[in-house]
């Protein structure tokens, strides 16, 4: 096959794939495109990996804003690679139990659309 035709075919497949996965009718519906009665399509759309503890190091604590800066490993349930980043903490009061430099195990989840620390334990 010629390079131009190969590229065109690859683009067509990619566009079709995106269109199919973005379609709420197909994503949450049955094979014939009708909604599946009795099924919670919102829950199916929000399904993701379970939260798993992630190793991290506390770089900074800002108790006034309820945020902690962490150098963390990959966060699988949020699709986030290893990096250093500030996160809001669900339980702000718990920040008093930690100090900069602590090695911790952190569980993350999405709260109000933001990646949030929902649990943090000293190693």
Image (cartoon, rainbow, N blue to C red):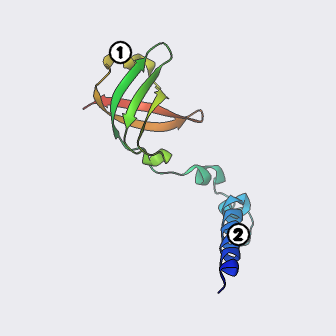
> Looking at the image, is mark 2 or mark 1 nearer the viewer?
2
User: Which class describes the residues within 10 Å of circle 1: few (<14), some (14-19), or many (20+)?
Assistant: few
Identify the secondary structure beneath mark 2.
helix
Q: Vertical placement of 107 versus 69: above or below?
A: below
Residue 30 appears anywhere in the view: no
Q: Position of residue 116 (x, y in %)?
A: 49, 32
Q: Earlier in the sequence, mark 2 or mark 1?
A: 2
Q: Which quarter of the figure has residue 9?
A: bottom right
- Foreground residue among 10 and 36: 10
Marker count (numbered):
2
Q: Vertical placement of 28 versus 52: above or below?
A: below
Residue 6: assigned label: none
- Foreground residue among 122 and 28: 122
Q: Is residue 68 left or right of residue 9?
A: left
Q: Which residue is mark 2?
A: 16
Identify the secondary structure beneath mark 1.
helix
Quarter of the image with the C terminus in it: top left
Residue drawn at x 67%, y 73% is 13
Residue 96: assigned label: 1
Q: Position of residue 56 (x, y in %)?
A: 33, 35
Quarter of the image with the N terminus in it: bottom right
Q: Vertical placement of 75 versus 61: above or below?
A: below
> Which residue is outermost to the top?
64
């Amino acid at each position: 096959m010629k390079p131009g035709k190969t590229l065109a075919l690859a683009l067509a497949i990619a566009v079709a794939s995106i269109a199919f996965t973005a379609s709420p009718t197909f994503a949450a519906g049955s094979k014939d495109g009708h909604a599946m009665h009795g099924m919670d399509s919102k829950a199916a759309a929000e399904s993701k990996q379970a939260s798993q503890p992630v190793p991290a190091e506390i770089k900074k604590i800002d108790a006034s804003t309820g945020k902690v800066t962490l150098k963390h490993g990959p966060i699988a349930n949020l699709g986030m690679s290893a990096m250093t980043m500030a996160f809001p903490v669900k339980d702000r009061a718990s920040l008093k139990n930690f100090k900069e430099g602590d090695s911790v195990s952190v569980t993350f989840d999405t709260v109000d659309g933001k990646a949030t620390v929902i649990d943090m334990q000293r190693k």
